[in-house]
Every structure is written in structure tokens, then in C-alpha cells.
């Protein structure tokens, strides 16, 4: 399997704050278009059931990373990661990433 990057753009700039501290800022912009298209295709094809398992959503890793960072959760805490992802998937603003609309 080949991993493709969702990175669209990278900006690097320098800031000087009021305290006289200089810092370099790296701003990466990512696209979720591929994950959204995959979710739509799976929904349209009815591909959410896999035996006893469900395909709940397709998510770009960059988005999960942002969610975990905002929640202050480290990747190594799998239970907390699960809760952050679940909470964000239940948010209506992220519904387009969902494949399965059931409750979990």
C-alpha cells in the first residue's frame, strides 16, 4: 500500500512578538478531499458492514492529529484517542466523513 500525502501547501515565516522573542512558524495546509470522496463512495456502495465490524468513517491522519492536539491527548493514550475521535465524529460538522450512521 502506498501512502499519499494530503499536504497542499507549506508556508514558513518568522514572527517577532511584543516581548522581543523571534520565532519561526511553519503552517501546513492539508486537504480532506480524498477522505471525503472515499466516505461518499463507501456510503453510496453500502460498504459499511464487514462481518461483525463496521466501517464508521474515513479520516485523514492529519485531521485526527489536529483533534488530539486540541484535546491535549497523546497518540500513546489509545483510550483517550478513541474518545476524542468518537466525540468529533458525533459532531454534525464532521458527518461527511462518516460511512456508517449507526450508534456506537
Image (cartoon, rainbow, N blue to C red):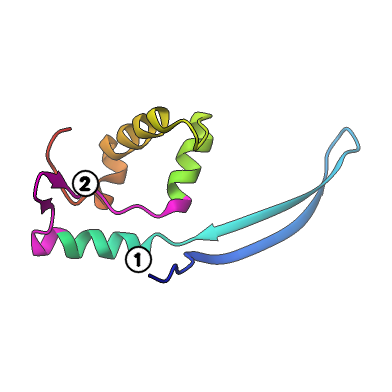
Which residue is rendered at x = 50% and y = 30% of the image? 73
Q: Nearer the viewer, residue 49 or 102?
A: 49
- Residue 3: % across, % down: 44, 67
Q: Which residue is mark 2?
A: 56
Horizontal side of residue 96 vs 13, given as left or right: left
Q: Which residues are magenta?
A: 43-62
> In this picture, is 79 found above or below 95?
above
Q: Nearer the viewer, residue 22 or 18?
A: 22
Which residue is rendered at x = 10% and y = 44% of the image? 52
- Residue 41: % across, % down: 18, 65
**Which mark sits nearer the N-terminus, 2 or 1?**
1
Which residue is rendered at x = 8% and y = 59% of the image? 46
Around disc 1, counting alpha carbons within 10 Å, would you say few (fewer than 14), some (14 to 19), or many (20 or more)? Answer: few
Q: Nearer the viewer, residue 17 or 59?
A: 59
Horizontal side of residue 97 vs 27, given as left or right: left
- Residue 93: % across, % down: 31, 43
**SS at badge 1:** helix
Around disc 2, counting alpha carbons within 10 Å, would you say few (fewer than 14), some (14 to 19), or many (20 or more)? Answer: some
Which residue is rendered at x = 19% and y = 50% of the image? 55
- Residue 51: % across, % down: 8, 49
Q: Which mark is residue 34?
A: 1
* Quadrant for the C terminus in the image: top left
> In this picture, is 53 found above or below 12?
above
Amino acid at each position: 500500500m502506498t501512502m499519499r500525502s494530503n499536504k497542499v501547501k507549506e508556508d514558513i515565516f518568522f514572527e517577532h512578538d511584543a516581548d522581543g522573542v523571534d520565532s519561526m512558524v511553519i503552517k501546513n495546509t492539508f486537504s480532506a478531499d480524498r477522505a471525503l470522496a472515499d466516505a461518499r463512495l463507501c456510503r453510496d456502495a453500502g460498504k459499511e458492514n464487514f462481518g461483525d465490524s463496521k466501517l464508521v468513517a474515513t479520516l485523514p491522519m492529519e485531521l485526527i492529529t489536529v483533534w488530539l492536539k486540541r484535546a491535549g491527548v497523546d497518540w500513546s493514550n489509545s483510550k483517550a484517542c478513541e474518545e476524542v475521535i468518537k466525540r468529533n465524529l458525533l459532531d454534525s460538522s464532521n458527518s461527511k466523513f462518516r460511512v456508517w450512521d449507526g450508534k456506537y
